[in-house]
Amino acid sequence: MAQLFVEASKIARARELAQSAAREVQAFIDRHTTVSIERTVLRLLGISGTGTRGAPLANLMVDRLREAKVLHRGAAYWLGRALRASPGKDPLHAIERVAAHPEKAPPLTAAEEVQLREEMRAESRSAIRELQSRIEQREELKRSLRVGSFEGAPWKYVIVATGNIHDDVEQARAAAQQGADVIAVIRSTAQSLLDYVPDGATTEGYGGTYATQENFRIMREALDAESRKLSRYLHLTNYSSGLCMPEIAFMAAYERLDMLLNDAMYGILFRDINMKRTFCDQYFSRRICGSAKIIINTGEDNYITTADADEAAHTVIASQLINETFAHLAGMKDEWIGFGHSFEIDPAREDTLLRELAMAMMVRELFPRSPIKYMPPTKHKEGDIFFSHAYDVMADLVAVTTRQGIQLLGMMTEAMHNPFLMDRYVALKSAGYVYRAARHLGEEISFRPDGIVARRQQEVFDKALHLLEEVARDGMMAAIGKARFGDTARTPEGGKGLEGVIERGADYFNPFLEILEGKA
Amino acid sequence: MKQPIRPYGDRKDDGVIQLSFVLPVPASEKAKEAAATVAKKLGLSHVLVACMEKAGEDYSFCVVYGRTHMQLDYAAIEVPTVVHRKHGFDELNEVIQRDVGRRIVVVGACIGTDSHTTGIDAIMNMKGFAGDYGLERYPLFRAINLGSQVEPAALVARAKAENADAVLVSKVVTQRDVHKEDARALLDIARAEGIFEKTLFLFGGPRVDHKTALELGFDAGFGPGTKPSDVANYIYYRLLERAGKAPPPQQTAHGTQDATVAGTGEKLGDTL
């Protein structure tokens, strides 16, 4: 029933503006690589595990190449060179030898250069084939099982975050048995600021559990078993954000995760990660997600947890259109782009239900082929768990009525502790009730073209259009510098991780990018 | 004058308490009895297990009512609070001009790994909170908000460089008491850098209260619902006090008397 009261010409204009703003950034992306992109290339080529003091081999190798100032040619090239120069040696030592004196490496003939690249391309194609076969396993399991509560019902998304992956498994199984469709394992606080991905199974974390490839594997295995038992597919999601966006995307794809939080601007605004770094990293991570059919969840909900949800609603729409463009530029299809927004208007005000419906319908209709990721209230959450459940249930009602695709069922104990078993239990029980009770509500009601809902959509969209005009005129980077999104200003040279951004050389070689961009 | 009280559900002094919890056993009559036993072992009588249902194969969700017989003397509970007459926006700017004679410098941040800037932004940013302007809006305050995930050392360094009168620290994430660890680390660095004595240290967040802040070594703590004007007034008064110009805010004694089980004088915490 989702109704849209915005003129089609304005929507088309907004998309053009978003595209023009993003294209300028894309030109920058296409000229650069990052340490995390190059580490991902090495991981795709089978470099895994850790070296001394637990540092991942991919980090040790890329760091050597960066220090030797040769990373602009691409890690895949140097791995090929190194293995050729030191056949039979382990890859780290081989890379270290080349990186120690890159100028002394015996020059290759033109034919050898071509041959080296062809060998690495062949390796890359076989790596991608292996990845695709793993994705196909995931898809096959999903096809054989029921998905979601009923056709069109939002997928019930809950989080687990005990810090211990084995406890997380227990909590996830209990939630699945109560009707959860998606399990998110919240990451340990500030993992996004680590410029490496920790290794192995972990049992200690703060406010969450480290995202590691082994933790992904453990949880996916448990959910596979539980899915078969319940005859209902359980999705797994994690976070491709922070300083290791593309690496997490690769690990998640390999371990058959279904979704990833992945936003073109979130890290810049809310984690103070350098914008050049994030723009490049989001691109390669989305290339991987698109190829692995991973649904990304964008992070616009965060804008209205810092700024006022009523006043800043237009920044959500503008940013979604920008995220859409970046995702398209990275080759993603609409059905893999889960646009994020949230139920966050101050509950002390009147008619918030109408205003939330207006927004939820508008987002639903602007992106008709995409799963919409609906987030619950957090900003105005206080300690009262009873009111918290009542408040979350209003979001459930909006979600099912407007057919949001994926709904986080509440951060019931926001800012106190992670949700307890009983909090998730009550949230799942209540959402089940609301989805049943309001299953066809949306099909039965329509809103007045001159009413609060229609006017609210028009007002928000007009402001979004105005903001996009400004962003297209000044450029994305300048607009972020003026705190146009999330009330937070960032500069192109500020933030963490800029030292990991490297201009590609004329001879830059990334066989995976060639394949993912359809050029090989 | 004693003021004995008990929790109150239906009839005054009935001592009614509602509990909800999960037991790590499958739902069953036995699980229900176990839920009742939890309540009884907590010292409750008239125990009613209103709900015992399956929360996944291996778990039972329980809602239990019972009555407690403990009683406490409300009059004996003391909570330190910050007390002073509050100036309005314009008036505060005027008195700062008159009594301090310069802009008050405040540096604030969310420290450690915390990225939740809602609290610090509400107090420091222009917009403020619930219609109460933030410190940036006051002409007589210089408010420097460093934002999220600031290392304690970086906050102290900036405070020192700015010759700050007050440092505002916000912590929202409190899992495993990480907020207290970071707060202590901050004060240790401030001591080492020699700015602890001359700077006011204020601690804020949804799980922060004045008492906890004092225990951690801060000058004051501000919990949920604090308005920027509360913080602005507090800083003004404390600066006056440090300059010897006004009486300090009234401080009550620290600590909360332990609740006792009525009639026995036995400490409740020791009974189980």
Image: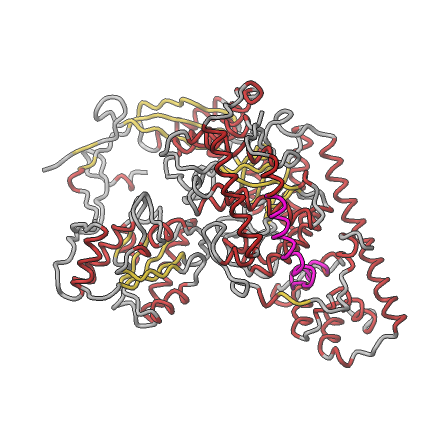
Which residue is depicted at the point 25% across and 68% down? Answer: B198
Q: Is residue A360 magenta?
A: no
What segment is highlighted magenta in the picture?
A14-41
- Location of the C terminus of chain B by quadrant is top left
Q: Residue A41: percent from the left, percent from the top? A: 72, 59
In the image, B26 versus A453, the foreground residue is A453
For this orientation, the residue located farthest to the top is A444
From the viewer's perspective, is A380 left or right of A436?
left
Q: Residue A161: percent from the left, percent from the top? A: 52, 44
Which residue is depicted at the point 51% across and 55% down? Answer: A271
- Location of the N terminus of chain B by quadrant is top left
For this orientation, the residue located farthest to the right is A111
Q: Is residue B75 above or below residue B220?
A: above
Which residue is depicted at the point 76% across and 53% down? Answer: A517
Quarter of the image for residue A103 reads bottom right
Quarter of the image for residue A337 reads top right
Using the rendered image of the protein, determine whether residue A198 is visible from the camera's viewpoint. Answer: no
In the image, A450 versus A334, the foreground residue is A450
From the viewer's perspective, is A57 left or right of B257?
right
